[in-house]
Image: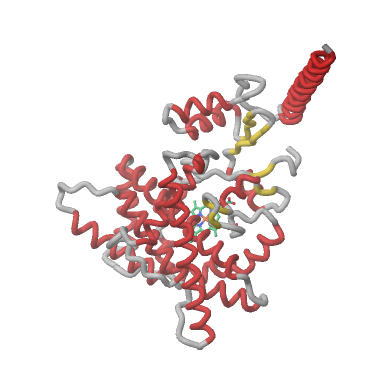
């Protein structure tokens, strides 16, 4: 009887604890709502799940969640609030706000960036420029990498841009028989990968010629893995274990290639050999001036440059092509400008690009991060006043 009484009281205690925790959690959700509800946003579907059921419904129906975000920003303004449990996300479609968030050190990157430190447990973008959440460390790296983002440096890359554009045109000319369908996105992905590997790391990939070689394959696999990783349980899924292993091997392979490249280049610098003036040389020279930089850090940025540079540029170009195909009047004007400014000239100079004013505007209007809104940046809003 005494034992039954004890069990009874333990159960009551446990129940009180559970109910107490539940009420505390409800209170916390309410507090979060009160804290951020001054920011406009669509009405919540439920107190607990906020807007998540609507978002999940879109994802389940294979529709674009960005269309919903666009609808919301059109209706409720350029800065809106999205709730899920106690989490509050602020979505902005305002270029001024994006600029402010990216430029100011008071906005911290969200913990979500930590997830890209590894891919299924294998070091991936590590503490590279994009994923480093520590402002001081980021700033130090950024100073080392600055030459790679300068206009003077870009000017020196025109030779490679011309060479790779010529290769693409030759490939397209081979296929242009009036019947053959060509997937332009695929072609552009290959050419951007070839350009980045050459201008950044002096590596001739030739994926336009053959993309079945290990490096382009590894890049394609890790990009796919980055999308799949949104599901936190994928690593434990029996069905996906083959893919997980392939992605881990790809991440290892990318870093191994980078390590070999860095070691080779360091030796060439030591031996005072002639070396290409690419991003890798700039980084190594700058790192040397700062008293050296650890190889793992350099590898993080090796991976980062490929991931940050390839898909973004390829998508931007592909979206611009789609829009030009859908707007023949704009295409005609752009074509007329190219004919007038460039004519039959094959090797473009940097200054020629500045003269293509109409084409530059077309390109800017269809910016992937602005017009298409396909780039997501996650910043922690708790650290600032909203
Ligand atoms: C149309 C093409 C591109 C778009 C739309 C784009 C967009 C962006 C955005 C939105 C960020 C900020 C990311 C964040 O903080 O989470 C970023 C950062 C970065 N991008 Fe790009 N990017 C493009 C091309 C490239 C290319 C070609 C490269 C290099 C080959 C590159 C390398 C980087 C790097 C290294 C960073 C980190 C910079 C830093 O934190 O200091 N991007 N890019």
Q: Name which residue lies at 47% across and 66% down.
A: 256
x%, y% of residue 381? 70, 41
Q: Quadrant of residue 39?
A: top right
x%, y% of residue 314? 40, 52
Give the mark count. 0
x%, y% of residue 68? 50, 29
Q: Name which residue lies at 83% across and 13% down.
A: 5
Q: Is residue 343 above or below residue 178?
A: below
Closer to the camera in the image, 363 or 342: 363
In the rendered structure, the answer to whether residue 6 lies left or right of residue 90 reads: right
In the rendered structure, the answer to whether residue 330 lies left or right of residue 128 reads: left
Q: Is residue 101 above or below residue 269?
A: above
Quadrant (top left/top right/bottom left/bottom right) for the C terminus:
top right
Q: Name which residue lies at 55% across and 63% down.
A: 301
Closer to the camera in the image, 307 or 117: 117
* Outermost top residue: 1
Q: Quadrant of residue 13?
A: top right
x%, y% of residue 382? 73, 40
Q: Name which residue lies at 24% across and 49% down.
A: 182
* Outermost front residue: 1
């Amino acid at each position: 009887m005494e034992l039954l009484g004890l069990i009874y009281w333990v159960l009551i205690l446990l129940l009180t604890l559970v109910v107490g925790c539940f009420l505390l959690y409800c209170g916390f959700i309410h507090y979060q709502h009160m804290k951020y509800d001054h920011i406009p946003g669509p009405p919540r579907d439920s107190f607990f799940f906020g807007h998540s059921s609507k978002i999940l419904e879109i994802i389940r129906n294979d529709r674009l969640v960005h269309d919903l975000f666009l609808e919301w920003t059109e209706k409720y303004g350029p800065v809106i609030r999205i709730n899920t449990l106690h989490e509050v996300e602020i979505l902005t479609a305002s270029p001024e706000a994006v600029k402010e968030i990216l430029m100011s050190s008071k906005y911290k990157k969200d913990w979500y960036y930590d997830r890209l430190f590894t891919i299924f447990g294998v070091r991936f973008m590590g503490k590279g420029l994009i994923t480093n959440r520590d402002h001081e460390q980021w700033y130090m790296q950024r100073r080392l990498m600055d030459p790679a983002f300068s206009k003077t440096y870009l000017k020196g890359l025109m030779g490679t841009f011309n060479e790779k554009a010529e290769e693409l045109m030759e490939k397209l000319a081979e296929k242009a028989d009036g019947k053959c369908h060509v997937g332009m996105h695929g072609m552009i992905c290959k050419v951007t990968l070839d350009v980045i590997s050459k201008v950044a790391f002096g590596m001739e990939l030739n994926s336009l010629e053959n993309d079945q070689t290990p490096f382009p394959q590894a890049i394609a696999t890790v990009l796919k893995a980055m999308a799949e990783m949104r599901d936190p349980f994928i690593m434990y899924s029996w069905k996906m274990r083959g893919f997980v292993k392939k992605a881990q091997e790809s991440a290892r392979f990318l870093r191994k290639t980078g390590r070999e490249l860095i070691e080779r280049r360091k030796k060439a610098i030591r031996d005072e050999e002639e070396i290409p003036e690419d991003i890798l040389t700039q980084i190594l020279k700058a790192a040397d001036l700062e008293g050296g930089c650890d190889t793992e850090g350099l590898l993080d940025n090796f991976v980062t440059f490929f991931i940050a540079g390839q898909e973004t540029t390829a998508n931007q170009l592909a979206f611009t092509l789609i829009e030009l195909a859908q707007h023949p009047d704009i295409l005609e004007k752009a074509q007329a400008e190219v004919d007038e400014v460039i004519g039959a000239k094959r090797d473009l100079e940097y200054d020629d690009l500045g003269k293509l004013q109409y084409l530059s505007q077309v390109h800017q209007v269809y910016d992937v991060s602005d017009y298409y809104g396909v780039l997501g940046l996650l910043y922690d809003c708790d650290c600032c006043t909203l």
